[in-house]
Image (cartoon, helix red, strand yellow):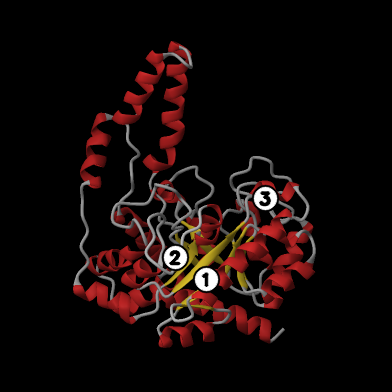
Amino acid sequence: MVSAVSLAVTGALNAQEYTASDKAKQIAQDNMLIDTHIDVPYRIANLWEDVTQATAKGEFDYPRAVEGGLNVPFMSIYIPAQLEQTPGASKQLAHQLIDSMEALAWRAPDKFAMAYTVADVEKQFEQGQISIALGMENGSPMEGDMVNLKEFYERGIRYITLSHSLSNHIADSSYDIRRQWNGLSPFGKELVVEMNNIGMMIDISHVSDDAFWQTLEITKAPVIASHSSLRRYTPGFERNMSDDMIKALGENGGVIMINFGSTFVTQAANRYRDMINQQIEQVKEQYGEESEEAKTRIAELQKDNPFPFATLEQVLDHIDHVVELIGIDHVGIGSDYDGVGDSLPVGLKDVSTYPNLIQGLLDRGYSEADIKKIMNENLLRVWRQVEEYAANH
């Protein structure tokens, strides 16, 4: 059970307000800001809103992106893991979600533009457009055929998260206790090679530890973790990265893009749902699942034990630790906005709040040069290296 002390602390933290200085806001406006994981495509596929305008829901829309200084959102072409059970379903959804992003750029060319290269995002930044880059979350649309890799590259996909919440035909998932491949499948190993050759970044978020290590053994180019945080702060949560993995990522030249979701940031949030659900089940067993007494006690339990949101400071702790382990050149932003439900930290609730993160970095003594690396330069370096490897092979 969550203690009264921890709840009091959580309440105090939730009451905090963050105000970025003019300097932090100016840094956000003057420099390219890349976020490698925003789940707008799947969000608007399920409940459409016009994100070229202010929206009532979600964490991303054009006005808030402008306010926050976001220039290059990698829009997630998210494919639910269960779709792999139906031949063709993953590929179909992937094309439809890509279509929706092309339509967004087509409807508002003064605001958005599709971006396929480093040169594209640099040009579009100078022109004042928001670059829509594409990452595929879950490689199931490959369907075991390298022809699909080429097809999706031509459609603009610039990274693939090899697996998602279940193991697929490419790699085992960190969330799936069935380790059918003990890492990468034979096709997955070939896919890593071909992604290098075609110029597509490899994303090791979501994969099992064995799949991570095997990927690093095979790849000839740096890899990214598009939206992962640190296991140091969430012990036992394999979805996050261990210190040894982060060190290996650094040696590979890669970048970890920090996920803002509270369950990725703190142990209290990570374990909250399991703990509260366990208590709810105990109440149901004691008083009867449908009884009024059970309903009353469950309501009280939920009221007395609110979700323990992380804070901006705790997100900064993750960045600090990466910098301590492998240096400033290997960390960036992969918020998971529109992808983690109501679990975002105090101070980082939507895309308008990046200046708060920049303020926090300034307060911790980061130089503007270091902040620029976190905002864009580290990811651009990896993207360029991936492009260059493909151009030369």
- Which residue is painted at 80% across and 64% down in the image? 145
Q: Amino acid at mark 1?
A: Leu
Relative horizontal placement of residue 31, taking residue 185 as reference (left or right): left
Residue 104: which numbered mark, if any?
1
Q: Are marks 3 and 2 in contact (CB under 8 Å)?
A: no
Circle nearer the N terminus (3, 2)? 2
Q: Amino acid at mark 2?
A: Val
Secondary structure of residue under mark 2: loop
Q: Quadrant of the N terminus?
A: top left
Numbered label tally: 3
| Distance (Cα) linking label 1 and label 3 | 33 Å
Circle nearer the N terminus (1, 2)? 2
Q: Are marks 1 and 3 in contact (CB under 8 Å)?
A: no
Which residue is identified by label 2? 51
In the image, is residue 310 above or below residue 134?
A: above
- The quarter of the picture where residue 383 lies is bottom right
Name the residue nearer the viewer: 240 or 168: 168
Which residue is identified by label 3? 172
Taking the image as drawn, is residue 155 in sight?
Answer: yes
- Which residue is painted at 69% across and 49% down in the image? 83
Can you give x and y, in whole percent of width and height, for residue 238 in the image?
54, 47
Secondary structure of residue under mark 1: helix
